[in-house]
Image (cartoon, grey):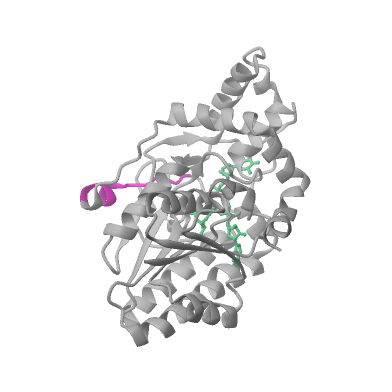
Amino acid sequence: MKILITGGAGFIGSHLVRLMVNKYPDYQIVNLDKLTYAGNLENLKDVENAPNYTFVKGDITDAELMQELFQDFQFDSVIHLAAESHVDRSIADPMSFITTNIVGTVNLLNAARNIWKESGYEGKRFYHVSTDEVYGTLGETGLFTEDTAYDPRSPYSASKASSDHLVRAYYHTYGMPIVISNCSNNYGPFQFPEKLIPLVINNIKHKKPLPIYGNGKYTRDWLWVGDHATAIDTVFHKGANGETYNIGGNNEWQNIDLVRILCDTVDGLLGRRVGEAQELITFVKDRPGHDKRYAIDATKIKDELGWEPAVQPAEGMKETAQWYLDNTEWMERVTSGAYQQYYEKQYS
Ligand code: NAD
Ligand code: TYD
C-alpha cells in the first residue's frame, strides 16, 4: 500500500509518520510537506533513512504539482494533515488559512479523484484529519458529538470546517471513499512553541512571563499526541467510508489550572522552589472571539472501532515537560530558526 501523508513534518504528522513507518514495514509512506515555519524535518531524524519512507517537499496549494505527484506515485490512500494550524495566526492573517486549508484540500481531492476514477475506488481511502474547533464553542456543560452542528468562529476553524464540508461533498457527489476525524487539543513532544503548553514550559525554564489570555477560564480537552496517532491509525484501517469520528482525551482543563500544574511540575523537575513559576503568570488581553470550552464525546470511536486514549493526563503532562526540558537543542534550533536549514543539509 502506498500512502501519502501530508503535513508529516509538523507536530501531529511527525508522530503519525513515525508510527506508520515503524508499524507497517510493507507500506510505502510518502510525506509531503511545504516546510512552513511549522514543518521541521528534525522531528523525523529517526526514520528519515527507513526504506519505506520518502520525503517530498511541496505545497498542496500547487494544483499541478499535486496532479504530478499522484501520477508518479499512484497512491492508494491519503492521510491529510497539512494545514495552517494556529488560531492566533489565523486572526492576524486569514488568507494563508484559506489557501492551504481549503484550496489545498480541494487540490488533493481532485488529484486523488483523477487517478482513482481510472483505477476504481476499491481499496482507496482519502482520510481528512480535522479539529473539534469546527463545532464552535460549548457552555459550561455538554459535549461535542459527531452530530453537533458546525459553528466555527475563528478563521482557522472556519477554514477547517470548509475543508470538512468539501471532503464530504466529494463522497456524496463523486462517491470518493473518504473518512474524517475531528480531534481535541493535542499535547506532547515536537509541538511548535507558539502553542500554549510548549510555550509555557519554555518560558518557565527561561523565567519569562506566562501569558494567559483573558481570565484563563477557557477549557480545552487535552489529548496525548501519541494517542491521536493511534486513533488515526485505527480510523484509517477500520473506519467506515463517509463517516466522521470524534477523538478526545476526556481530559478537560481550564487554561489557568493547566498552567498552574505545569508551573509546579517544571519547578519540581528543575529543582526550583515549587511556587516560583506561578509568579510568572501574567494575564494579558484576550484572544478575539475566544471559544469558551471544547469537550469531546468519543463514544463512537470507542464503541465502533475500539479506540481509547492510553496515556493518563498526569503522566503525559509530566513526560511532556521533561521532554521539552531535556531537548534543549531542539528547542534552541526551533526558536532560533536554525531548523529551517535541515532540509538543504539532508536533501540537496
Ligand atoms: P502543525 O502546524 O504543527 O503542522 C502542519 C504541517 O503542515 C507543517 O509541517 C507544515 O509545514 C505543513 N504545511 C502547512 N502548509 C502547507 C502547504 N501549503 N503544503 C504542504 N504542507 C503544508 O499542525 P499540527 O498541530 O500537527 O496539526 C496537523 C493537523 O491536525 C492539522 O490539519 C490540524 O488542523 C489538525 N488538528 C490539530 C490539533 C492540535 O491540537 N494541534 C487538533 C486537532 C486537529
Ligand atoms: P492553543 O494552544 O493556541 O490552541 P487552540 O487555540 O487551538 O485551542 O491555545 C490553547 C488555549 O490556551 C486557548 O484557550 C488559548 C490559550 N492561550 C493562552 O492563554 N495563552 C497563550 O499564550 C496561548 C498560545 C494560548
**Residue 294 lies in magenta, yes or no?**
yes
Q: Residue at x 35, y 36 (%)?
A: 310
Residue 172 drawn at (x, y percent): 32, 79
Residue 332 seen from this side: yes
Ligand 1 - quadrant of the structure image? bottom right
Residue placed furthest toward the front: 51
Considering the image in quadrants, where does the C terminus appear? bottom right
Q: Residue at x 57, y 81 (%)?
A: 63
In screen coordinates, is 162 left or right of 309? right
Span of residues in magenta: 293-303
The correct choice, above or below, for 23 with respect to 29 in the image is above
Closer to us: 48 or 248: 48
**Residue 326 lies in magenta, yes or no?**
no
Considering the image in quadrants, where does the N terminus appear? bottom left
Residue placed furthest toward the bottom: 118
In screen coordinates, is 184 left or right of 65? left
Residue 98 drawn at (x, y percent): 59, 70
The correct choice, above or below, for 171 with respect to 14 in the image is below
Residue 169 drawn at (x, y percent): 38, 77
Q: Residue at x 55, y 53 (%)?
A: 49
